[in-house]
Image: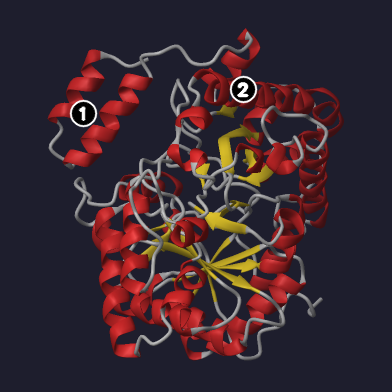
Amino acid sequence: MTSLEDIRSMVTNPKYTYRQRVAGLANLAENLLDPPAVRKQCSDALTNRIICDMYEGSAPYRPRYLLPDYKKVLVNGSEFLELPPAKDLDDALAFLLIMYSATPSITGYPVYFGDLDTLLLPYVEGVVDEDLYSKLKRFWISLDRMFPDAFAHTNLSPVYNRVSKMILKLERELLQVVPNISLKVDPTLTSDEYILDAVKTVFACGKPHFINDPMMQSDLGPDYAAVSCYNSLKIGGGSHTLVRINLKATVDAAEGGVEPFFAATLPYYLDLTAELMESRILYLVEESHFFESNWLVAEGLLELDKFSAMFGIFGLAEAVNTLMVRDGQEGTYGHSLLADDLGYRITSFISAWVAERKMPYCKGNNGFAFLHSQSGIDLDIGVTAGTRIPIGTEPSLISHLKTVARHHHLFQSGISDVLSFDETAVKNPQAVVDVIRGAFKSGMRDFTFNLDSNDFIRITGYLVRKSDLAKMPSARHSSTYLGAGSVADSHVDQRIVKRVTSAESSPSTSS
């Protein structure tokens, strides 16, 4: 519960920028209100952090993630913003910056900048490379300075083009935290040259992620995008909320081994997670009236029927390891086929359960929530993000990919596994291209890697710069505070570094 001391600390603490104080005070004010009503069992589980509302606030008045249809507004203009349709590149860039400033989200910054190469391509005809470079550079710098939060995200299309090529060049030059980037990869449309350019960009700045475009389209349709960390949702829609269940905590909360866990413990806490999610959705739609009052909805840039919600899980590894011990079995997640099979049994059970539990105002997924492998927050101590293998225990590259890839098809709204490569990758970039293609062929939805030697640390689905951490306690990017906590408590900078050589086998072909 918010106290006067909490408010006073936010006002007087010199480490925060003005905008960070304003956002912090708004959150404190919101939390003076009573949260949406739930049963005592649900409230107790939330208090004990067995289930978690991601600290979204006591009175949901904006969706967690929303993805405006920027293409539509560039073509049609906006009555609310008093802007005519964009006619050239200068118009489009200025229009988008204005749009972003008026787009809400849970972070206070837009979590989606649009699929920028696709959005800008219609406006670059006749623009010479020199002008494209200078205009896009000013725009790119503006994104980082105006929206200093690593969860602000753009996507690149599967087909290599002038704009995507220039964006990757600017990323290598500017070395910014913002924007986070995902590249949609199609096995046929996306050339090796394109992936190779992106891989070399990761070497410099940790971006982009790589997305299995056919898998995403099969679950979400062609009009989807990755936002925030790596959370994929429908363009023109979004996610009302993200509520997650701590699988480690569910196991710790009850005695018994594997079969009692599936028979009673897991269904009980899944039901409480769904109850919390439902209460927050109903408050957002029916109490705070977001979809009745927001101009983005009025102008058709967001549609309630394209929204769903995200049912997140984390702590799979610890849940598996504890249940293995209780049943007298040897082996741990990521290092034992028996343990890995148990992990997959758990995620498959949850997937089937979520697919049967109707949720209000979730027409974006036919009335159900999207299952999500939640990537963790800075307060998660002693528990592993999503379905990942615990940091510091990761096996060899191929074994690692085989362990986690089997889960990916279950998580329509996102799942990520962060791999850390050493300098051998820089000498063999084509080998990394082969690994990415092989990983997608083996069933991975999202492929993310980080180079151990650059200035960037990939926390979960977002990045912080080591040089920014060195400047703490103050930070220009609000996400740096979260990253600092994860480095200190979850040791995300201590992932086992993997070698990638030209002879590296792909996970789709090796045994």
Residue 30 appears in which quarter of the rendering?
Answer: top left
Residue at numbered disc 2: 276
Picture layout, residue 26 above or below residue 389:
above
**Quick one: quadrant of the N terminus?**
top left
Would residue 298 appear left or right of 158 to someone viewing this image? left
Residue in the image at 39% along x and 87% along y: 126
Residue pictured at 37% horizontal, 73% vertical: 88
| Tag shown at residue 75 | none
Q: Nearer the viewer, residue 124 or 350?
A: 124
- How crowded is the residue under tag 2: few (<14 C-alpha within 10 Å), some, or many (20+)? many
Looking at the image, do the residues carrying marks 2 and 1 touch, with CB atoms under 8 Å apart? no
Q: Which residue is mark 1?
A: 10
Is residue 463 at least partly visible in the picture? Answer: yes
Please tell me in which quadrant of the rendered image residue 7 appears.
top left
Asked whether residue 407 appears in the rendered view, the answer is no
Front residue of 295/103: it is 295
Can you say whether 465 is above or below 27 in the image? below
Identity of the residue furthest to the top in this view: 40
Q: CA distance from mark 2 to mark 1?
A: 28 Å
Residue 103 appears at what percent x and percent y? 40, 45
Report the amino acid beneath label 1.
Met
Name the spot of residue 148 as percent of width and height, x first.
29, 53
Disc with the residue nearer the chain's start (2 vs 1) = 1
State the SS at label 1.
helix
User: For this view, does 380 lie left or right of residue 88?
Assistant: right
Looking at the picture, which amino acid does disc 2 mark?
Answer: Leu
Q: Reply above or below: 506 against 207.
A: below
Tell me what residue is drawn at x 22 percent, y 57 percent.
470
Q: Nearer the viewer, residue 149 or 156?
A: 156
Q: Quadrant of the C terminus?
A: bottom right
Numbered circles on residues, count: 2
